[in-house]
Amino acid sequence: MAGAGLTVAQLVAAVAHRSGERLTANIVGSPARVIRGVAPLESADPGQLTFLANSRYRAAATVSGAGALVLSAVERARIFPTPPTDKKTLIECETPYAWFALAAQELTGPDAVHAGVAPSAVVEPGARIDPSAHVGPGATIETGAAVGPRARIGAATFIGRGTVIGADSKLYPGVHVLADCVLGERCIVHSGAVIGADGFGFAPLDGRWIKIPQSGRVVIGDDVEIGANTTIDRGAMGDTVIEDGCKLDNQIQVAHNCRIGAHTVIAGCVGIAGSATIGRGCQLGGAAMIAGHLSIADGCVIGGGTLVSRSISEAGFYGGSFPLMKHRDWERNAALLRHLDDLRNRIRALERQLPRKEPP
Amino acid sequence: MAGAGLTVAQLVAAVAHRSGERLTANIVGSPARVIRGVAPLESADPGQLTFLANSRYRAAATVSGAGALVLSAVERARIFPTPPTDKKTLIECETPYAWFALAAQELTGPDAVHAGVAPSAVVEPGARIDPSAHVGPGATIETGAAVGPRARIGAATFIGRGTVIGADSKLYPGVHVLADCVLGERCIVHSGAVIGADGFGFAPLDGRWIKIPQSGRVVIGDDVEIGANTTIDRGAMGDTVIEDGCKLDNQIQVAHNCRIGAHTVIAGCVGIAGSATIGRGCQLGGAAMIAGHLSIADGCVIGGGTLVSRSISEAGFYGGSFPLMKHRDWERNAALLRHLDDLRNRIRALERQLPRKEPP
Amino acid sequence: MAGAGLTVAQLVAAVAHRSGERLTANIVGSPARVIRGVAPLESADPGQLTFLANSRYRAAATVSGAGALVLSAVERARIFPTPPTDKKTLIECETPYAWFALAAQELTGPDAVHAGVAPSAVVEPGARIDPSAHVGPGATIETGAAVGPRARIGAATFIGRGTVIGADSKLYPGVHVLADCVLGERCIVHSGAVIGADGFGFAPLDGRWIKIPQSGRVVIGDDVEIGANTTIDRGAMGDTVIEDGCKLDNQIQVAHNCRIGAHTVIAGCVGIAGSATIGRGCQLGGAAMIAGHLSIADGCVIGGGTLVSRSISEAGFYGGSFPLMKHRDWERNAALLRHLDDLRNRIRALERQLPRKEPP
């Protein structure tokens, strides 16, 4: 479809369809303009669609060479109080970024599945591969595993015994899903991700560490995306659970027995220690670190680089990271920070000598 | 063994045996109760064993439906001053968590090795694979490498030329051990770990960087566990060394020429820069970062998220991470932190005007 | 060459040649001494070369058993005002570390390429492999991909459709370069690196997240090194770009649409969020985190563990990390930090009562 392109009118109809008629749009300008792809505001050409979702880029939107621009009615009225010349079609809608996302999916076209198992893949007896699924070269599917309809298993990807991969899920090359895990439908797992490695559990004895067998599973819902080189450990006894619609970026560590609520998004390099419970609809900024055995309420937003060391019981925006400074300023301030209690004591001493008056 | 289960009496004998008679236990209640597996306090059923190792979970232990509960004598006397009903057997011992770990190992049963080399594995001439070892599909064993008795090399795992894998070690699928490294006996290495990649060494010249060949090795002792996607670089000239009994979680980076002392445990996402020396029996919390060319004394505990920027010569508990705040509080406090020296100067100015009296 | 060794005179000539006659050296002592390898100051023997690049190691240099020592003229004059005994040859030059790097490369010898495709590799029709290139066992090269002269593709490495690997580049086993990416000449990519996974782009709609197709590429210049388990995401629409001569350590995350200027070095565990622009010749310390949509000027040095949350427009040394403390001191100081505004307010109250006099 992307080859021939779509008219703006066709695109509007397709997005409405993809969204279950949730996303409608108002076309200002020619609905017959043909769109073949998407591009950023700065580089889009007359055959391309772009979007304005942040007023910060209003100036770029005004001069963009894109053939079609999706934006809110408010921005449309502000930037183009009269419709622009014949060169550009405006697509007015409530949620331009979501509309653009679905339009881009439509223009990208379906990601075709080449059903069948590559000759160099190893499928053990007792593994069930749906005939419509694809298994790439060098992949290994162990006994008792099940790969659902239209699922794609990339080259050299490993599916352990008893593991279930849901319909329409796509595992890129070099993914490892160890034994007895469950992955839902329409999931995407990027290269290098490891799902179901042992959790980190050891009991101390006489200065040594005795391994606790990790007998739980990883259970992942539908529509979950897991980034490259992200690791999600199996539970020690119960399971590690990632609920529906979660999106995890690259290089994330999820330890054993964590539960991550539905539709939570987690940016790159985040670490979540064992038995932490993250609510639904949370947003964890890059490199945030979550200590173990705590819980974070639904709808929390955690700033990048924040260490969450205690439970959060109320939705809100939380932070905690050292501010950036010139290195010499940092040295001075860090030295003082080490002795903040001295400063406080000096203030106390002053206060004792100078009893506080009523505030003015 | 796990299928048929074990009586509590059999389990007590097995743990004593596994621990070299170090861990003995006192049975309170029926020694004939059959145990088939382990479970957490909350969900354990009459056929399962659970444990109490932290008084915080005393209430859950009191009402747990587990058939057998291992706990200390002190807790036993406190929770069950008289033996409980016939439904539960108590196992009293000194170190309940370690006892539980060995019991869980016993109930899990041995991890059988299927001796032999998969047809799709590539074993170069000059590699030595012990006949009792297992090499999985698509694995590559280069010339000069040696895989010891009962070792397991997972699917698509890579063992470089000259590398030695000790007896009874288990490498999960997708592990990479580059050339000329040494891995001891009974080690476990999880998927995606990379051992022996080049250290990061470059000499600056005229604004460019010249690579220093990394000719050292990685030498890993016995009973070491290495988590998923953890990386341990080879030394620049000397070796990178991980001593016996160390346990490394996922996503850890160990740079060239580090030495990590025996029985040290390192939680996920930790980074250790080049030529750092970590003592024996240390515990590094998640996402701690250790600067290069420093040393940390035996027995140090480092809090999660701490940046260790100088050597630590004395055992102890160290920390240093920004506390969690509501974001608007963080903004205000971070701004003040940037100018802590101003606050100090204002205190000084006040002190100059108000000479300090003798403390009361 | 490394087997037979080289005389100091041959080594000096070879380094001059490798550097385009940029690096010359003055030999003090016997030019006929034979050198077979390199070693650190402490352990080098009479057949080995070592270096002194940091005056901190002057004492070790003085007593080193190395057959040859490269150092600056200033250090030479200071340590050896008269030439040492016949046991050691001194090599005096301007940039000892860079000289040593090239000498070590010379002594290590060339990394021979065994041209040809392993029988178990899968090369799809339409992929072009230069006859002088090497493709290892179990590697997959998809249609439209091109592997240049003398390039080495490691075991189980994946090259996606349309991706170009430049001449003399070396990809270790288990590297993943997804579709339509470009890697320049003489690059080195270590095991577990993932280049070209989808960027992390989702539009919110009614509490769910809609995927933005990631249609850009990753474009990597010449002479770039990429560490083990490092991830570099493809652009959302435009490209993610790593310019010539960059060196990236292990476990780094580079998000979509970042641009990293030429000859910038990035230490392990760094995370760079989307659309960040890092200048040329920068140095990012380990575990530094760079927020998205900002830019860092050429020549900036960022301390380890620093969170860069705003653009930096001027070259310089920047930092920002919480200082290390004993844990009990940290607890006290962190509590105060949470209420730094209270301290400020108490200072203000004191100042109101005690109007500031002129400074003495």
Image: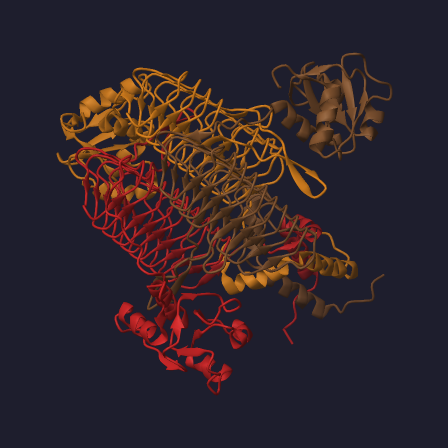
Chain colours: A orange, B brown, C red
Quadrant holding the N terminus of chain A: top left
Task: Count every numbered label the image shows and give the total.
Answer: 0
**Percent coordinates x, y for residue B65 in the rendering:** 71, 16
Residue C327 as seen in the image, left or right of residue C199: right
Residue nearer the viewer, A98 or B90? B90
Q: Is residue B340 visible?
A: no
Residue C20 as seen in the image, left or right of residue B136: left
**Percent coordinates x, y for residue A77 in the rendering:** 27, 34
Residue situated furthest top in the rendering? B86
Residue drawn where x is 46% and y is 43% of the image = B146
**Image position of B320 with respect to A260: above or below:** below
Residue drawn where x is 69% and y is 21% of the image = B49
**Percent coordinates x, y for residue B224 in the rendering:** 57, 42
In the picture, residue C144 is in which quadrant? Answer: top left
In the picture, residue A150 is in which quadrant? Answer: top left
**Image position of B183 with respect to B152: above or below:** below
Residue nearer the viewer, A116 or A26? A116
Residue nearer the viewer, A97 or B353? A97
Residue drawn where x is 32% and y is 54% of the image = C224
